[in-house]
Image (tube, helix red, strand yellow):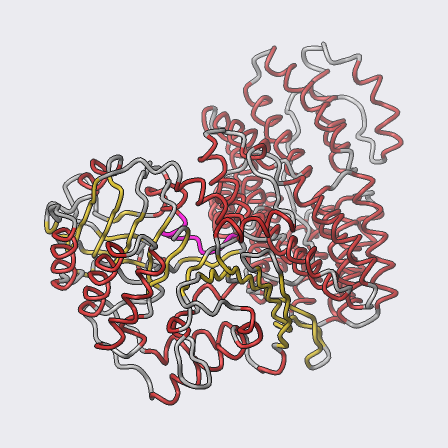
Amino acid sequence: MHYRLKSLCFATLVLSLSLPVDGAESQTKENVQTTVNAQMQRTQQRNGGGPQLNKLGLQQLHTGQFREALETFKQVLAIVKKIRYREGEGRTLNNIGEVYRRLGEYSKALESYQQALAIAKEINDATGEATTLNNIGLLYNNLGQYNKALEFYQQALNIVKQIRNIAGEGTIRNNIGLVYDNLGEYAKALEFYQKALAIRKQIADKAGEGQTLNNIGAAYTSLGEDVKALEFYQQAVVILKKIDDKADEGQTLNNIGFLYKKQGQYDKALEFYQKALAIRQQIGDTAGKGLTLNNIGALYNSLGMYADAEKTLFATIEVWESLRTQTLTDDQKISIFETQAFTYRFLQEALIAQHKTNTALEISERGRARAFVELLASNISGSTDDKQTIKLPSFEQIQQIAKSQNATLVEYSIINQPFKSQGKEELQQSKLYIWVIKPTGEIAFKQVDLKSLNTPLARLVNKSRLSIGTGGRGIKVEPKNELTKKQNLQQLHKILIEPIASFFPTNPEDKVIFIPHDSLFLVPFVALQDEDGKYLIEKHTILTASAIQVLNLTRQQRQKVKGKDVLVMGNPIMPKVGIPPVQLQPLLGAEKEALTIANLFKTKAITGKDATKAALKKRLSTARIIHLATHGLLDDADKSIPSAIVLAPTSNDDGLLTPAEIVDLRINAELVVLSACDTGRGTITGDGVIGLSRSLITAGTPSVIVSLWAVPDSPTSELMTEFYQQWQKNSDKAVALRNAMLITMKKHPQPRDWAAFTLIGES
């Protein structure tokens, strides 16, 4: 995600009704307010009331009177429905959707847009269809789902070109530029903005011109061309003030504040932020208010005014969380949280600077895995209202979770700070916060300086993984130079473990649960080496989780486990995947693994052509243990390959079991083992790793064993067989996995061969 804290103007399309209208359109709030009562009396007129009220609603929308606009448009909707005017109904629904979007009520906005789109298609209203497609694109932009936004914009652009709607083309080109800006493709963004600006000047669209000037300024800000940026911002403010466009004026003032903050002119930055905040509060722009409050809080941090920063950033979080109280899909919650996550890290910084380490831990938890926690809580309770089933964890509750887990919890948080490079401000990883919560409730805090690394942690993590040497089931890849591998793993140990090692348990079978952050989700904790060359797994029993709150919920899931059987699948008939199609290779080691494990549990393994999705689903409700030994796939959009577990294809399906399919299953198993490549990986977000492991826990299993890289076939088979043998001797899954790793390590000493797997959830 981008940490560039700017707020770009969203150019929208709203629609007038085509019925006859009389009277001039008033431009100021005073005039709008004066005409309200008179217009209300005309709502019953068949051909006059609707259009007059619609004009009033548009005026209220453009002057930032969003609640008033909503009520006005609802009255218009009642009129056009009564007279069965379908075009007017569709266009009014679009306008209602636009008001809801401006208010940050995204689910209501999408519902209105979808109704409007259906009507526009039904009556062949091309203008209405393009308008609504554009506005749906804006909604997904607000949610941070930029590729989805682009998809809707392109559809809208095709239509306006076809019907030669030049004004619409200007708006949509502006919005496509906005997507590229959010994706960090600033040169491409400028290209679209410049075309949009030319169109808007040509047709004398002053509101659109002001919006696009602001966006060009924001792009130049991102490129570090501050003089150009300020020039475009100032042009935008002049226009937006003149036409009384408060919403866009507030955004541009916010951006000027951000520009001055970049330059270290903090007094000027605060002045413009406060002007922007006043406007955004006045017009009820909730999302805009949150962004500007966040910027003020970050500014206070830069000034060392940590108490003021704390107060302001807590207020920001209240705004963000009010936006998330509405009904959103899981994907939408994840996306919108990604646009807000930086606030939680700024607040941690302000709290730590004031030695409020326990409160900072609460905020660290509050700022991770929120969508996952809500989804899990909803599934466990059986309630559709997830907001009533989960409470944010207090410091005391976090202590209680550590006690109930009888484990030492280690939570990491990576903090970014601004720095100047060649005269411009950028963000870099500056600190690593680490909390250790013992089963006794005792909590320790350490802070690690990351600036001295001169490289992002993600790069160091990747170097460590590459030096181990990773291939795939059936693919042999030699590790890099032994000394290089050792140095990389020891460097990670020095950063992540050494500062807190004294707080770890002395009994190697006592559990340590790591709660990573960002790129640390890919760290092979078990393989980290101390200065004596000893691996961490030799000293400790290790698990991972996406959040402390998730541990509390997986414990509740464990109590609901109903399955009794053992389901083992291995080496299915492999399908072809991707475009162009690539034939996946069979895994003889996986088949041997499945047969051996099935024999341990006195059951029959399902292999070859029988190892299908249908066979899996048939056994899900009765299985206590599910073991799948096969290929695992990572998302590869360029080749049209989804994240998936590979099963045997049939005439009805391609054999790829995706996270989206898994979430809809009901799994009663105590443990699911994905003995396949990269099954612990996925898209890393503030909600944790979005992939197969998250889907399986969401579907009902409290414990998942997954891999962090492409695992070699033969050692994986041996490790998995050993794990189940150890588990039969010791009921603790984490201890059994540790013992299996130690035994496998003796025969296969390279971490590539034994360190890929991690247990997520309950032990």
Determine the residue positioned at 54% across, 34% down.
386
- Find residue 26 and report its horizontal and vertical position in percent: 83, 31
Q: Residue at x 78, y 49 (%)?
A: 250
Residue 70, given in percent of the width and then of the height, sits at 70, 27
Residue 539's x, y, as percent? 41, 72
Is residue 161 among what the camera can see? no
Which residue is nearer to you in this view: 535 or 508? Answer: 508
Q: Residue at x 23, y 52 (%)?
A: 628
Answer left or right for 606 relative to 730.
left
Q: Tell me the quarter of the picture where residue 662 sits.
A: top left
Q: Quadrant of residue 500?
A: bottom right
Which x, y percent locates residue 690?
Answer: 43, 53
Frontmost residue, 759 versus 509 = 509
Q: Which residues are magenta?
A: 687-694
403 is higher (above) or lower (below) than 133: below
Which is nearer the eye, 743 or 138?
Answer: 743
| Residue 303 magenta | no
Q: Which of these two is toward me, 658 or 510?
A: 510
Q: Quadrant of the N terminus?
A: bottom right
Residue 688: say if magenta: yes
Q: Is residue 162 above or below residue 540?
A: above
Q: Quadrant of residue 714?
A: bottom left
Q: Is residue 217 visible?
A: yes
On screen, residue 291 versus residue 381, left or right, reads: right
